[in-house]
Amino acid sequence: MKKLSLILFSIIILINFSFTNSSEKNVVKGKARIIDGDTIEINKEKIRFGGINSPERKEIGYRLAKDKLIEKISNNILTCVREKNKDKYRRTVAECFINGESLSSFMVKNGYACDYMYYSKGKYAKEQKYAKANKLGVWKMKYNTSWENKCRKK
């Protein structure tokens, strides 16, 4: 009986270890360097926030979005959960968190990014509706409508 218990215990430990190890492969933690309003770099790994889009360089709102992300992240340690596939530029796609708060949700809710319907399937629609209704961030500016149209693509 002791031998059977020891075998079962060993199997449980092995299963637990393999699940822990595989989930750790999907997570990256560290301090971030901000590239723009929806892209960061942690430990030389470029990470694109999945499901959102912030204005690009030379678009109205670019500097605002980038500065607000810099301010929000400050010197905090981020935890990013990687998606299965990389984007077309070979960047990691992930949802990143500070103390359990989603940065994607924060960026959209405060008007610094939009819900990128094609990728998000509407995950941040409520946050965008709130930001737009309250004219927050980019929504209070005379932004380029091509940015908003890109957000709507399904």
Image: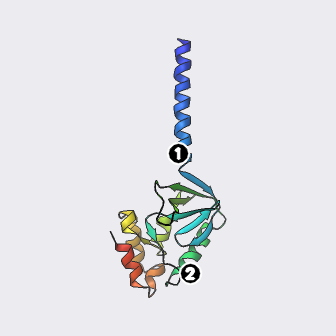
Mark 2, residues whose alpha carbon is within 10 Å: few (<14), some, or many (≥20)?
some
Ranked by sequence position, the earlier of labels 1 and 2 is 1
Q: Residue furthest left?
A: 154
Disc assigned to residue 125: none
Q: Residue furthest right?
A: 75
For the residue pair 14 and 131, the one nearer the viewer reads as: 14
User: Element type at marker 1?
Assistant: helix
Q: Is residue 112 above or below residue 44?
A: below
Question: Residue 81: in sight, yes or no?
Answer: yes
Q: Mark 2 belongs to which amino acid?
A: Arg
Disc assigned to residue 63: 2
**Residue 96's spot in the image, x, y percent?**
53, 60
Chosen colour scheme:
rainbow
**Residue 104's spot in the image, x, y percent?**
48, 65
Question: Residue 99: in sight, yes or no?
Answer: no
Q: Is residue 59 above or below residue 43?
A: below
The residue that mark 1 highlights is 23
